[in-house]
Image (cartoon, rainbow, N blue to C red):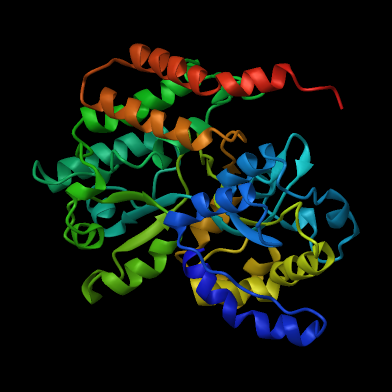
Amino acid sequence: MGREGEVIEQLLPEFERRNPDIHVQIQQLPWTAAHEKLLTAFAGDALPDLCQLGNTWVPEFAALDALTDLDSLVARSSVVRAEDYFPGIWETNFVDGRMKGIPWYVDTRVLFFRSDLLSKAGFQTPPRSWDEWQRALAAVKKEVGPARYAILLPLNEFEPLLALGLQQEEPLLRDDGRWGGFSSPGFRRALDFYTQMFRNGWAPSLTDAGISNVWTEFAQGYFSFYISGPWNIEEFKRRLPAERQHDWMTAPLPGPHGPGASTAGGSSLVIFRSSRHVPAAWRLIEYLSEPVVQVRFHELSGNLPPRRTAWQYKRLAGDVYARAFLDQLERVRPAPAVPEWERIANEMQLTAELVVHGKMNIEEATRELDRRVDAILAKRRWMLARRKPS
């Protein structure tokens, strides 16, 4: 899908040279159409052998029984070694205890921040805990004045709040994903911390459409902290003016009491059950999983590799902006592995927006969110209640 579909064209000649008995045919899909096209292909028994799936899509296609179990293939592989993958990313591919995909690239969220403005506010290092973060935000806001802000948290992006929720001890969904867990003390604490940033005037109550250009506004100091993913490393390098290139840095997300967890996103490689070429598809997955190939994939796409070994190569090891991601990847947690997760995340984002605008308090919002999530999960509960013991 997307840019990855273009980049992989450059990686396949070497694979076909090593495997002259295999020819790979690529079909590129835009991300905006990929989900619908795959579901249509499933209904029409026309799925490909091998596919890139966003991590949050894996549980959905597993629920359709469309994915090949990869446990036995992994067990026999000398290339795909579980211990070399970041644990939270590896875990995203398990559904009901079975391995359904192999991580291809990773996406997590960290802090991008204006180091010069943070220093002017009296902080020489980025915050590591929520308490430190709040003190830094307050100091930056005081430094930049009433017309500017300390942090940008676009209200149409659920990932920052999700990361704060994943930092809590209680799960976001209860009872094996049957019920919402958003009324738990942990998520209420996360939502309160999130909304305080707006109540204290540290963040503007805007969507990303309300910002003319993230990079320009960051360069002008309209905000000093921004939670984003690895694609923005190259964007910041390319889009910030020369006089600002030494005024920004990245840092892992702060947690309630120290370095915190973040989201375990990205894409995985799966083999569909309908494939008639499973051995060949697996050989391609092994090739794309080789650390040197993953480093080359990073150079072409900017996507980060899910294997620790790949991070030892100079291209990544020497990138000061990527170091925060390496640190953060050791502390990522997957979203609940349920097919309904994307709908649930949307409800979480909409509910948080109501709290930010003062239309609900924390208790009302989390209770209402659980009610909506419980309704979304009703079919899941019905199906699990009728599942035959294995």
Is residue 125 shown to the viewer in this render? no
Q: Nearer the viewer, residue 1 or 37?
A: 37
Drawn side of residue 49 relative to residue 365, left or right: right
Tell me which residue sits at (55%, 63%) in the image: 304
Query: Going by the image, does 263 lie left or right of 367?
Result: right
Q: Nearer the viewer, residue 375 or 334?
A: 375
**Which residue is found at the position 24% from the left and 43% from the top?**
207
Most distant residue in the front direction: 44
Rendered-image quadrant of the C terminus: top right
Q: Is residue 29 above or below residue 45?
A: below
Is 92 left or right of 126, judged from the image as shown? right
Q: Is residue 258 above or below residue 210?
A: above
Up/down of 378 relative to 276, above or below: above
The quadrant in which residue 367 appears is top left
Q: Is residue 372 above or below residue 268?
A: above
**Could you tell me if residue 65 is visible in this image?**
yes
